[in-house]
Amino acid sequence: MIATNYSNVRQNFARYCDEVVRNEEAIIITRRSDENVVLLSEATYNNMMENLHIRSNREGYARLLKSIDHLEHGKGQKRELVEDE
C-alpha cells in the first residue's frame, strides 16, 4: 500500500490512477486537516463489496465455508453441466 499526500496526488493524479489499476495497489491519500482517504480501482472496490455482501448473510457464508472445507478434504463431486436451451 502506498501513502502519499493530497497535493502529490493532485499533481500526479493520472500516474496514481494507473498505479492503482495496473498493480492492484491501494493508495492512502493523507490530508493534513481531515481524515485520510483511499484510492482503489473499480475492480478492487467491486470485489470488496461482493465479499461484504456474501459475508453479511451468516447462513449463506457458513454454507460456503462448509463447501470449501468439503472440497479441500476431497469430498467434492464432479458433475456434468447441463445447458439450458
Image: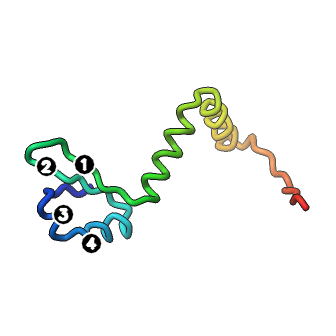
Res 7 quadrant in image: bottom left
User: Is tag 3's residue or tag 1's residue first in the polypeptide sequence?
Assistant: 3
Q: Would residue 75 be found to the left or right of residue 6 on screen? A: right
Label pair 2/3, CB-CB below 8 angstroms:
no
Label ID, residue 77 = none
**Which residue is the site of mark 1?**
37
Q: Measuring 64% from the left and 43% from the top, which residue is drawn there?
A: 72
Residue placed most toward the observer, 14 or 66:
14
Q: Assess whether mark 1 and mark 2 are in contact (beta carbons under 8 angstroms).
A: yes
Q: Name the residue under label 3.
A: 9
In the rendered view, tell whether residue 24 sits above or below residue 66. below
Residue at x 43%, y 52% (from the top left corner): 45
- Relative placement, left or right, of 59 versus 77 is left
The tag earlier along the polypeptide, 4 or 1, is: 4
Q: Where is residue 26 in the image (x, y as percent from the top left)?
A: 31, 56
Task: Residue type at mark 4: give it.
Answer: Ala
Q: Mark 2 points at which residue?
A: 31
Horizontal side of residue 24 vs 51, given as left or right: left
Amino acid, disc 2 = Arg
- How far apart marks 2 and 1 lie (CA) works out to 8 Å
Q: Distance between the residues labelled 2 and 3?
A: 11 Å
Asked if the residue at tag 4 contacts the one at tag 3, i.e. Cβ–Cβ closer than 8 Å, the answer is no
- The local crowd at label 2, few if under 14, some if 14 to 19, many if 20 or more residues have their Cα within 10 Å, is few
State the mark number for residue 14.
Answer: 4
Amino acid at the residue labelled 1: Val
Residue 84, percent from left and from top: 88, 58
